[in-house]
């Protein structure tokens, strides 16, 4: 039994499933291959109609899907509802814009009339995580499907209900059989799927270890891959920052989704002159968080998704305290549940694990620096490069510092977030490639140069241009 969902708050088993056999996998991939032959020839308006319907169903079923998310991985109910609505927005964005992004373009090259034609690749394997079990899948699938590809989902083993619901969602919206399929497979079976000729590309959101493995497997098969891995985003508080405003946003960025987000603020890099004030106000706000049943509106801090995640987090905290970090609040865990308290540790230094590793849970680490230059050096000293934010009353200075951050997503006076209209991804050990926006939809396509020379015939130059432009418009 590979797929097993345990409600993080109640401890109740809510789902289980056996993994598929090799024969079952091949049978399902054959359906995907058949679907691609049809879907790659579809018109953009047909693809858009499907995604508009998916968006409508997401909104109609938002409460139902949110309950699944909360039950399987413990997200606060209102956060789960927001996740589902964000999925609908992502679908509509690509339904409305994909044709603009992917239509043929005429260019002056090759000594002839030349067209840049964008064509789909085939089936995209999406290896997805549990922390945003709908959004991570939809942001990948909506782009792939609008580009004319099919999607094969391998979801995290603790969100099997969500995985099945996503497959049914596309079928209910009118997708042809095989366009979006869910495979209940183990991590060890991913290699078999990547090696299958049906799979044309691979997208993974997950851990560094999973990313290295999948990238290696895709490389061996010479198939393109996209990786969105871990992050240790710096939250840089300068001496001229509005501290109350910064703290309100720090609270949201660190403790949303129980801190289980790759783009959550994890390293709070604070200039000495305002550090005491920031830490004290931060502590006061954290004290007001209420941990409990994520299905209740009164709960403001969700449980973590699994006990092993709590245990790993607590080991990082204990290491920091043992190396001299100061516990400001929280940091108490007794190993009997998925509830980890909202915590802050101060005076974090580079010999500690929390300084160098991703802290995937509700623990804020405070790194004090003497000035802006040291703040940037600390921020860029990480092996991660997903996101970062700068907090200052001087937005021009903030922009200058944000430009110098070594990451894929830099924000000034705003928390790091993803938006369908903006490219999203990281550098360094946070991965490569981009999702979302025009850039994301072009990750898994064949950008073909099509050059047409006229050697004979009676067409005038004007007639040739007219025919070529009509051909482009028809695509």
Image: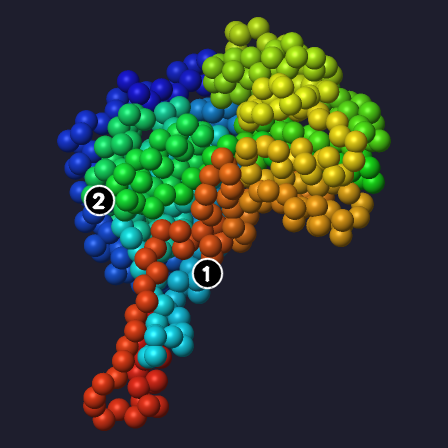
- Residue 368: image x %, image y %? 75, 27
User: Of the numbered discs in the image, which one, if any, rests on residue 355?
Assistant: none
- Residue appearing at x 81%, y 29% in the figure: 272
Mark 1 Cα-neighbour bin, 10 Å: few <14, some 14–19, many ≥20: some
- Tell me, what colour scheme is on the image? rainbow
Question: Where residue 266 appears, x then y in whole percent?
Answer: 62, 29
Left or right, 408 with reference to 251: left
The residue at the point 53 percent across, 53 percent down is 421
Query: Which image quadrant is residue 297 in?
Result: top right
Q: First in sequence: mark 2 or mark 1?
A: 1
Q: Secondary structure at mark 1?
A: helix
Badge 2 marks a residue whose secondary structure is loop
Nearest to the observer: residue 390 or residue 133: 390
Q: Position of residue 114 (x, y in %)?
A: 34, 74
Residue located beneath label 2 in the image: 198
The tag on residue 97 is 1
CA distance for labels 2 and 1: 28 Å
Identity of the residue drawn at 43% across and 14% down: 12
- Asked if disc 2 and disc 1 are in contact, CB closer than 8 Å, the reply is no
Nearer the observer: mark 2 or 1; the answer is: 2
> Is residue 198 rendered to the left or right of residue 339?
left
Position of the N terminus, as image quadrant, is top left
- In the foreground, 141 or 447: 447
Q: Can residue 357 be spotted in the picture?
A: yes
């Amino acid at each position: 039994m590979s797929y097993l969902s345990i409600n993080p708050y109640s401890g109740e088993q809510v789902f289980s499933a056996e993994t598929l056999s090799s024969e079952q996998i091949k049978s399902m991939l054959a359906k995907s291959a058949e679907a691609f032959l049809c879907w790659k020839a579809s018109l953009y308006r047909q693809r858009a109609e499907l995604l508009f319907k998916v968006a409508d169903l997401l909104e109609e079923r938002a409460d139902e899907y949110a309950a699944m998310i909360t039950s399987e991985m413990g997200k606060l109910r209102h956060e789960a509802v927001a996740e589902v609505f964000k999925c609908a927005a992502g679908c509509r964005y690509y339904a409305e814009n994909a044709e603009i992004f992917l239509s043929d373009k005429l260019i002056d090259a090759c000594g002839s009339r030349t067209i840049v034609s964008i064509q789909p690749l085939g089936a995209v394997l999406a290896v997805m995580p549990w922390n945003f079990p709908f959004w991570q899948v939809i942001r990948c699938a909506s782009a792939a499907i609008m580009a004319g590809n099919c999607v094969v989902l391998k979801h995290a083993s603790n969100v099997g209900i969500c995985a099945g619901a996503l497959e049914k969602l596309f079928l209910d919206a009118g997708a042809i059989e095989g366009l979006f399929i869910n495979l209940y497979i183990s991590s060890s079976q991913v290699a078999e799927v990547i090696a299958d000729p049906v799979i044309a590309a691979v997208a993974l959101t997950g851990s560094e270890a999973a990313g290295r493995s999948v990238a290696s497997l895709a490389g061996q098969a010479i198939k393109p891959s996209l990786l969105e891995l871990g992050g240790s985003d710096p939250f840089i508080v300068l001496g001229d920052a509005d501290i109350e405003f910064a703290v309100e946003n720090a609270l949201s960025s660190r403790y949303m989704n129980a801190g289980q987000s790759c783009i959550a603020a994890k390293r709070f890099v604070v200039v000495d002159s305002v550090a005491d004030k920031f830490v004290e106000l931060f502590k006061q706000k954290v004290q007001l968080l209420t941990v409990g049943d994520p299905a209740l509106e009164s709960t403001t801090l969700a449980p973590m998704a699994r006990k092993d995640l709590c245990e790993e987090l607590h080991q990082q905290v204990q290491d920091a305290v043992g190396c001299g970090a100061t516990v400001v609040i929280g940091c108490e865990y007794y190993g009997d549940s998925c509830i980890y308290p909202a915590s802050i540790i101060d005076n974090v230094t580079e010999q500690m694990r929390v300084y160098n590793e991703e802290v995937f849970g509700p623990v804020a680490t405070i790194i004090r620096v003497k000035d802006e230059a040291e703040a940037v050096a600390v921020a860029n000293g990480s092996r991660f490069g997903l996101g970062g934010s700068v907090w200052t009353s001087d937005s021009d200075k903030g922009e200058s510092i944000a430009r110098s951050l070594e990451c894929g997503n830099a924000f000034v006076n705003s928390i790091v977030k993803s938006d369908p209209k903006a490219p999203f991804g990281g550098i360094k050990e946070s991965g490569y490639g981009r999702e979302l926006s025009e850039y994301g939809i072009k990750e898994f396509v064949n950008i073909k140069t099509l050059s047409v020379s006229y050697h004979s015939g009676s067409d005038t130059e004007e007639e040739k241009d007219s025919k070529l432009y009509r051909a482009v418009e028809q695509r």
